Amino acid sequence: MSEPDFDVAVVGAGPAGCVTAYLLAQQGHSVVLVERGEAPGAKNLSGGVLYGRVLEQVFPDFAAAAPVERRVVRNAVTFLTSTGAVGVDLTSDRLDGNAYTVLRARFDAWLAERCEEAGVFLMPGVRVDRLLTSPSGAVTGLVAGDDELSARVVVAADGVNSFLARGLGLRPKPAQNQLAVGVKAVVSLPRETIDDRFGLVGDEGAALAMVGEATGGIGGGGFLYTNATSLSVGVVLRLDDLAASGASASDVFDRYCEHPAVQRYLRGGEVLEYGSHLVAEGGLGMLGTVATDGLVVVGDAAGLTINSGLTVRGMDLAIGSAIAAAGGIGDALDAGDTSAAGLAGYRERLMAGFVGKDLTTYAKAPAFLERPRMYRDYGPVLEDVMVRAFDLDTTPRKHLASVAWDALRTSPVGMLDLASDLWAGVRAL
């Protein structure tokens, strides 16, 4: 029996694929990293927030060396109404180094360069058509066009639609309520303008999350992140709710950008990029089989995302899964057993670490965030309470509890609704 071309073949050069490839090469294994785009990051739109503590385990100095945009010191969660906004806005130096904004085209390219330095063989511009399998069904490599490439282990890091994982039946077709449509843009603005509008200094950055009128009542939310000389802006719309509404995702995005609370940050900017893609929203419920004979699944391909209502996480979970996968695959290669049983250490590491524990903690979050009142009713209620509190005229004042009670009595939210949502929110978030 001939020797395989590589110990490991990784499909997809995003954070999950790159970190898996890098760590396995560091262990001394031969690794090929196959990327469909013309270069790593070439197919990525916009960017996002990288919660970087996990990446520090791989690259302790990444914040100084990598092309990060800004370090996030301001986080805000805002309910939008038709013309107003009310929310929680936190600025604290205690958040320094916790998160960074990145533009994936630049960041993924940097990760791929680290892989090549570690000895990974990078193959960009290659589309994998299918997996090679043995008569017993074990994965033994890849097929790309007329070419075949054999490996002891294949790593599927090919994104939320992962045809590799789904082709083997490791993940069922996601339900519509487990997926969302993300519409994003990058808007260019001078650094000084961004600093002034967001109250930032130097390399400080901000991450704003918005719900309610941000999506026109459709389940999901809007975001606004500061880059060095641009803003990443977009909406994420739950697929089932979007379909039921009959609305156009691009129209929802346009209305979001035109809202006064958003437009104040965007005005005068120039759109550099615009597009849409699918986003996993199912949390723990989307996690299928992550290891089988000769194959492991990491990152978005394994459905590893968490939307807690306060933060939307994907990259840190992808990197966490990569660290777990590299450990599990390394053990399997050293033992000479790349069967499902030999690769089971990956799932054990995944679930024992922060990725599995956080997925379990927020397992109820997707169902909680499906409640329509979160996007339709609570914004106006909160705005009403705050307007009554700050609209000081000659009318005698009431205690805030009475003000809140008056606002609730005239809103669609009943006391039983409020109690139910509060209890569900405490358990889910």
Image: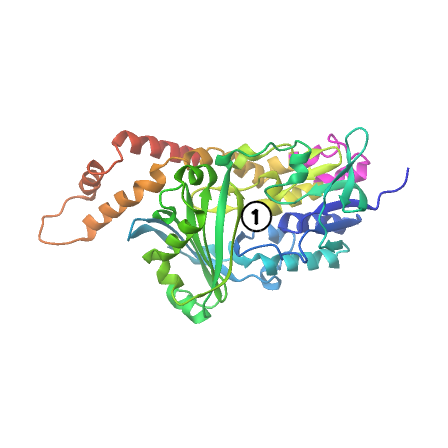
Which color mode does the image show? rainbow
Q: Residue at x 49, y 48 (%)?
A: 182
Q: Answer with the quarter of the image where residue 336 lies.
A: top right
What secondary structure is marked by label 1?
helix
Q: Quadrant of the C terminus?
A: top left
Dominant SS in magenta: helix
Picture mark count: 1
Asked whether residue 270 is drawn in magenta, I would say no
Can you identify the residue that label 1 sits on?
A: 316
Kindly identify the amino acid type of the residue bearing the numbered disc 1: Asp
**Mark 1 residue crowding within 10 angstroms, few (<14) / some (14–19) / many (20+):** many
Q: Nearer the viewer, residue 270 or 204?
A: 270
Image coordinates for residue 247, horizontal then vertical, percent:
40, 44
In the image, residue 331 lies in the stretch drawn in magenta: yes
Look at 63% across and 51% down and name the residue there. 14
Residue at (72, 50) in percent of width and height: 34
**Residue segment shown in magenta:** 328-347
User: Percent x, y for residue 54?
Assistant: 59, 49
Quick check: 156 left or right of 148?
A: left
Q: Quarter holding the N terminus? A: top right
Residue 49, how many percent across, how many down? 51, 53
Image side of residue 366 versus residue 29, left or right: left
Q: Is residue 162 left or right of residue 89?
A: right
**Residue toward you, 266 or 152:** 266
Q: Report the side of 98 relative to 168 (left or right).
A: left
Tell me which corner region of the image, top left, top right, bottom left or bottom right, holds residue 132.
top right
Establish if 231 lies above or below 143.
below
Q: Position of residue 421 (x, y in %)?
A: 34, 33
Camera-side residue: 275 or 48?
275
